[in-house]
Image (cartoon, grey):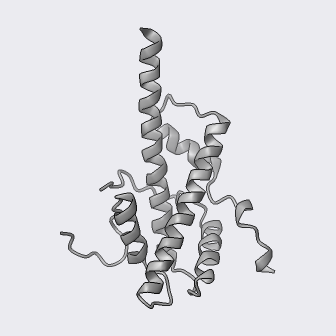
Amino acid sequence: GPGGLMLGESRVLDKRRLQELVKEVDPLEQLDEEVEEVLMHIADDFIDNVVNAACLLAKHRKANTLDVKDVQLHLERNWNMWIPGFGSEEVRP
Amino acid sequence: GTQLRSCKDEAFLSHPHLLQKVNAVARKYGLEDVPKEVANLISHATQERLRNILEKLATVAEHRLEIYKN
């Protein structure tokens, strides 16, 4: 059943996609496989961190669904990241 | 804060896998399945996080080359 799916095994980030990003940042950069692995881990950890924190915020709102604003609030507060173009566009201070 | 510099049509993360992962966590908190939009935002944020790291790596690599040259 779906409970048997292992999160660690699902590759959320494709290596090809990661390499595209590397080339975008620095066309001359070549990543070792080890560095690639570390970056995949960082991506995984980041997703876990964001989703867990956003879920807590949703619970705090007494909502039963995760909303874009839960994710945005966490990204802004903890990662100093503001990603525009999602959900209701509020006027920013 | 950090802003995205480019918005490609292709999602950074594999959406089926991402949704599976995100929904599994949401369920743990007793939340319903997440909207696609949320997964999309997480995908963009992850790309931004890695981009920041890669930019730092590129700077470090440059410095290292300069040290070797001297």
Q: Answer with left or right where residue B55 lies relative to residue A12.
A: left
x, y (%) of residue A53? 48, 72
Question: Which quadrant of the structure image shows residue A6?
Answer: bottom right
Q: Answer with left or right where residue A4 lies relative to residue A25.
A: right
x, y (%) of residue B32? 57, 87
Disc tally is: 0
Q: Is residue A62 above or below residue B35?
A: below
Q: Is residue B39 among what the camera can see?
A: no
Residue that lies at the very extreme toward the top in this rendered image = B70
Q: Observer-nearest residue: B5 or A67?
A: A67
Q: Residue at x 45, y 46 (%)?
A: B51
Q: Is residue B53 among what the camera can see?
A: yes
Q: Is residue A79 above or below residue A1?
A: above
Q: Observer-nearest residue: A77 or B11?
A: A77
x, y (%) of residue B68? 47, 12
Q: Residue at x 51, y 40 (%)?
A: A22
Q: Is residue A66 above or below residue A33?
A: below
Q: Residue at x 53, y 72 (%)?
A: A52
Question: Which quadrant of the structure image shows residue A70?
Answer: bottom left
Point out the image quarter for the N terminus of chain A: bottom right
Q: Answer with left or right where residue B15 lies relative to residue A11.
A: left
Point out the image quarter for the C terminus of chain A: bottom left
Q: Residue at x 36, y 76 (%)?
A: A87
Residue that lies at the very extreme toward the left in this rendered image = A93
